[in-house]
Amino acid sequence: MSILSARSLSVRFETPRGTLQAVNDVSLDVNERETVGLVGESGCGKSTLGKALMRLVPAAEGRIFVSGQDITRLGSKAIAAIRSDVQMIFQDPYGSLNPRHTVGKIIGQPLSVAGWKRADIKARVCELVDKVGLPQAALDRFPHEFSGGQRQRIGIARALALNPKVVICDEPVSALDVSVRAQVINLMKDLQAETGVSFLFISHDLSVVEHISDRLLVMYLGRVVESGKAADIWPAPAHPYTAALLAAAPVANPKLARSRTRKTLQGELPSPLNPPQGCAFHTRCPIAQARCHEERPLLRSIEGHAGRQVACHFDLVTHQKTPDLAATET
Ligand code: SF4
Ligand code: MG
């Protein structure tokens, strides 16, 4: 069953330089006990999509559903009531924790907002700090007394306080050292196994998402360009952009046939204020053809590959191509 869904969701911002279409016609589902990885370069609209799903930024068009309930136009009171079901973990474990509050107060904050009694909050907070692998003594201390990885554990404890159905994780390990990342990801996986929570895991780094996602959504300039089971996409990406991201990922999976030589993606991400005509990726695509400059490819199912979608006229699965993703080796 789908816990969190979006249908044709768009988010726009008015800027001095014009309208910025940050999220464009995005549909997605996060099912029970599932982790969906949302990947793409920074600036592609992933974080904005995450915030729109939380109703932290307004949707210009489209609908958002939590456990089947349409929350798109709910007022602030009703939104507060669904906050217990949908929580968010932020990238910056420093900035997202109030430096003047003790860890106990930070973790207990969603519970007190939800009207829990003091004694119940205390008991729940003690349980949570234990669940995320921090000592009870941590509760009386302040965020600055902890390392980045420990602060992210505090953020996770706070996000899980109300037993949410889904947590939107926006680059939760990007600010952490590589050695600490694996620990935090393993903790998240363990907590998922224990509580059944679903994750929408936002990351620009495919090597992070690879280890945690059941399904993937790849975004480029505000649109989904590929989606499907992670196990189908890793060995054979359909969109040239996904293939380029995979080729640029720091850790190649040795089981896969893909080259272990890192290749960087050519060209710059075009400005979302002025996206290219036709396929938005044509300015960087190694297999672009004349048609790509004129006609925007729609997101469509890939024939014979259940559950996979791609927005490319000449997708690599149907055309069985391995493009030379060329570019500079690093
Ligand atoms: Fe490349 Fe054309 Fe496919 Fe766009 S539609 S990704 S430019 S081949
Ligand atoms: Mg971001």
Image: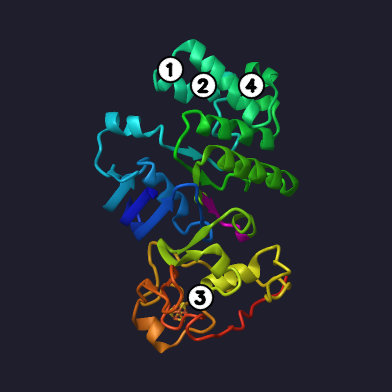
User: Of 190 and 140, which appears nearest the observer?
Assistant: 190
Report the Cα–Cα distance between label 1 and label 3.
Answer: 48 Å
Residue at mark 3: 238
Magenta residues span: 201-206
Q: Position of residue 208 (x, y in %)?
A: 63, 55
Residue beneath the point at 48% across and 77% down: 283
- Tag nearer the camera, 4 or 3: 3
Q: Position of residue 22 (x, y in %)?
A: 38, 56
**CB atoms at circles 3 and 2 under 8 Å apart?**
no
Report the Cα–Cα distance between label 4 and label 2.
Answer: 14 Å
Residue at mark 1: 116
Residue at mark 2: 108
**CB atoms at circles 4 and 2 under 8 Å apart?**
no
Residue at mark 4: 142
- Under circle 3, the secondary element is loop
Report the Cα–Cα distance between label 4 and label 1.
Answer: 23 Å
User: Of 101 and 237, which appears nearest the observer?
Assistant: 237
